[in-house]
Amino acid sequence: MAPSAAADATKDECIAANESAQDLRQAGRLREAREKLTVCVAPSCPKLLRADCAQRMGELDAAIPEVVFEVKDGVGNDLSAVRVTMDGQPFAERLDGRALPANPGEHRFEFEADGLSKTEKTLVLREGEKNRHERVVLGKLHPEAVSVAAARASEGPPGPQVSTEEAASHGSVERVAGIALGGAGVVGLVVGSVLGVVSKSTYDHALSSECGTAVGFADPKTCTQAGYNDVQSAHGQATAATVGFVAGAALFGGGAYLYFAAPKGDDVTVGPTVGAGSVGLTVRGKW
């Protein structure tokens, strides 16, 4: 019934609306029951009936569940131009962040936006449940939508593009950075190895020459002061060796990732160099 017609409802229409609202309430159709009550609260209805309908309307307002849909695309952008159906019937033509009333019970919602795949979600809504937030993510573009987007892009002015040479140059920089990190990682591993050997040598010397061999560990009671100091130095060297190993491994792994993940090109070369008393790597390229 239209609002103007509800305002001019007759006594019989007011009574029928009140009775119909009670039947709908018992059937769990709270939204429809509330619509019926808007008829019997009209000024043309009897005063006592209006009061009864107004009380029932307040009870329904508290009982009708409300849900807020937060719809996003695959990269996390909020979407508002989303059509929603509930149990196959239109529910909302657009989402603006407001809570939407629905009847209690289990419902199947479908969400659809232009260019994105349709998504379904089943919810069980409970009486009195207010401002329930549900997050929905719409999937990838339909194949036909991709074709339309490609056609539109071909009609418009070309946007900025990255040339093959620019991509190769960027890959060269990444590979050079990867080689540098890998080299630093090798240095860390070498330093860790050397410190580990030195630590072991220092500790063994202290035990055998300055602490005696009967104890087998550094004890101030059996070691000379120099021996105990050497043992402490060995512990510090061992700690530094461990740090060198860990840092070297991390740098080497990061360098390897940068090098092999970079766009390929023929503009970077790596080769060994051998000189008088030195060995190294030579990196040649352009960027």
Image (cartoon, grey):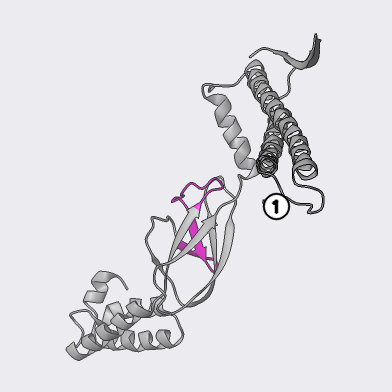
Q: Which residue is drawn at 30% across and 85% down?
A: 56
Q: What residue type is labelled 1?
A: Asp
The answer, for residue 116, to whether it is visible in the render is: yes
User: Residue 72 location, x and y as percent?
Assistant: 50, 51
Q: Is residue 148 above or below residue 116?
A: above
| Quarter occupied by residue 245 | top right
Residue 40: image quadrant is: bottom left
Q: Which residue is at 73% across, 23% downward?
A: 264
- Residues 122 and 26: in front is 122
Up-down relation of residue 273 to residue 48 (above or below): above
Q: Is residue 96 left or right of residue 172?
A: left
Identify the main secondary structure in magenta: loop
Compared to residue 203, the image places residue 180 above or below, namely above
Which image quarter is the C terminus in?
A: top right
Secondary structure category for the residue under label 1? loop
Q: Is residue 215 left or right of residue 42?
A: right
On the image, the x and y values in percent for residue 205 come to 78, 39
Residue beneath the point at 68% across and 53% down: 221
Q: Is residue 37 above or below residue 212?
A: below
Which quadrant of the figure has residue 106? bottom right
Answer whether residue 81 is magenta in the image.
yes
Query: Is residue 81 left or right of 221 when viewed as pictured?
Result: left
Q: Quadrant of the image for the N terminus?
A: bottom left
Q: Which of 173 and 232 is in front in this view?
A: 232
Residue 134 relative to residue 8: left or right: right
Magenta part of the protein: which range?
A: 72-91
| Residue 232 visible here | no
Instruction: Pick whichever, 76 or 212, lies toward us.
Output: 212
* Residue at 28% from the left image edge and 79% from the top image edge: 39
Does the magenta segment cover residue 83?
A: yes
Q: Mark 1 points at which residue?
A: 219
